[in-house]
Image (spheres, rainbow, N blue to C red):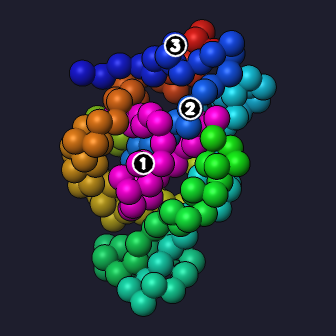
Amino acid sequence: MNIYINTKNLIKKNKINKSILITGISYSGKTYLYQNLKNNKDINLYDADEIGVGKWYNKKNQIVKFKNNANEKRFKNHNFLWDIKFLKLFLNKNNNCYLFGLSENIFEASKLFDKCFFLNINSNELKKRFNKNDRNNPMGNTIQQQNIILNYMNNFKNQCLQNNFISIDATKSPIDIKNYINTLI
């Protein structure tokens, strides 16, 4: 069952009283939601990419740069991981916040949050978003990367549900989701 974020229990006098994670696969709308909500003065919003919690690592656990034309072999030999120690420190300083992002260790990281939500998107909508790519993030720029995202989608959704993440229907337009959230804060 897909639902919108119900923040009534998370808001106290227009202030968030919990750390909230909003995640989703690439192209699900995380950054778009963040960009449209970040000017709200009543809540603290952060994009995981902007705070620098995540890095690409090779099999030797060395930090490497993302290659825009990364293929399946590169993804098998590299991981995008959040630094859990960094995240703990960040959340201790900013415990009343929404954090938007995704990493390959998202389920480990999710244990640090009070509530976790995921943007649930279907493959048809995802393909439409691939074709309207106006993102700054290079992930998904190639057909091979898009196929990796599509193949990962169902596994990710199942893992989110197994980890008790709350589903947000990302087939609704990001503007509709933003407006719904704004009516509650």
Residue position for label 1 = 110
* Upstream in sequence: badge 3 or badge 2: 3
As for residue 99 lying within the magenta part, the answer is yes
Q: In this picture, is 36 found above or below 67?
A: above
Q: Which of disc 3 and disc 1 is earlier in sequence?
A: 3
Which amino acid, mark 3? Lys
Residue 40 image position (x, y, % from top left) = 74, 25
Q: Is residue 90 left or right of residue 177?
A: right
Magenta span covers which residues?
96-120
Which residue is nearer to you in this view: 126 or 132? 126
Amino acid beneath label 1: Ser
Tell me the SS state at disc 3.
loop
Residue for badge 2: 18
Estimate how packed mark 1 is, as few (under 14), some (14 to 19) or many (20 or more) residues with alpha carbons within 10 Å: many
Which mark is in front, 1 or 2?
Answer: 2
Mark number, residue 8: 3
Q: Is residue 71 visible?
A: no
Task: Residue 74 in the image: state x and y as whole percent.
Answer: 38, 79
Asked if the residues shown at circle 1 and circle 2 are in contact, with their CB atoms under 8 angstroms apart, the answer is no
Q: Position of residue 150 (x, y in %)?
A: 28, 51
Measure the C-alpha gap from mark 1 to mark 2.
Answer: 13 Å
